[in-house]
Image: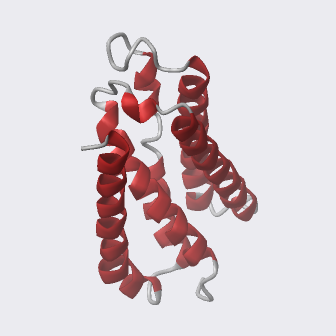
Amino acid sequence: MNPLFVLAIQCTFSCVVFLWLGKWYLEPKMVSYPKYKILLFLLFINAFRYLPLSLYMPGQVSENFPTMVKEVVAHGDFLAAILALITLLIIKKKSRFTTFFITLFCIVSCIDMALALALAMYTKVYLLPLGVNYFTVVVYVPLLIVVQYYIFKTLTLKNK
């Protein structure tokens, strides 16, 4: 079977599963929970975006893995993880900078995901051995995409 087709099937299934989890379990809570409590939960999921730093560990990915893709993925996600942690603290402290940091996180997160996915597809990294990072690609990345959708959805809520 074509590797790109397998990747597409697995990412699609992951997105569907996470969208159903959101629709069935998160959305019913969104009307009654405070907006920032929901955002705390969603940002905690992003706090694990240090995981792509494993691209720098020996033997984790092919020696032919493009350096530029490795740097964009690892550094972009690590920056998003740092911003997620800072934003979590700022929300908990009820700082006047809360909206700014949530917005900054969303911008960095979306740019990172779009750029990393575009570069990975362009350079066809799905044809290279990815080791355990393949799990990140087919499970965690779709989760992050769905979580970003729910962050935007939460930001449009009328409740406090």
> Which corner quadrant holds the N terminus?
top left
Rendered view: 60 above or below 113: above
Rendered view: 61 above or below 20: above
Return the residue nearer the eye: 59 or 28: 59
> Which corner quadrant holds the C terminus?
bottom right
Task: Classify residue 36 by image quadrant.
Answer: bottom right
Task: Classify residue 126 by image quadrant.
Answer: top left
Give the image location of residue 67, x and y in percent.
57, 18
Say which residue appears at 29% left-offset and 53% top-offset.
10
Say which residue appears at 62% left-offset and 44% top-offset.
112
Rendered view: 89 above or below 80: below
Rendered view: 126 above or below 13: above
Give the image location of residue 57, x and y in percent.
39, 15
Say which residue appears at 45% left-offset and 83% top-offset.
30
Give the image location of residue 37, x and y in percent.
48, 70
Say which residue appears at 28% left-offset and 30% top-offset.
132
Determine if residue 155 is in view: yes
Determine if residue 82 is in view: no
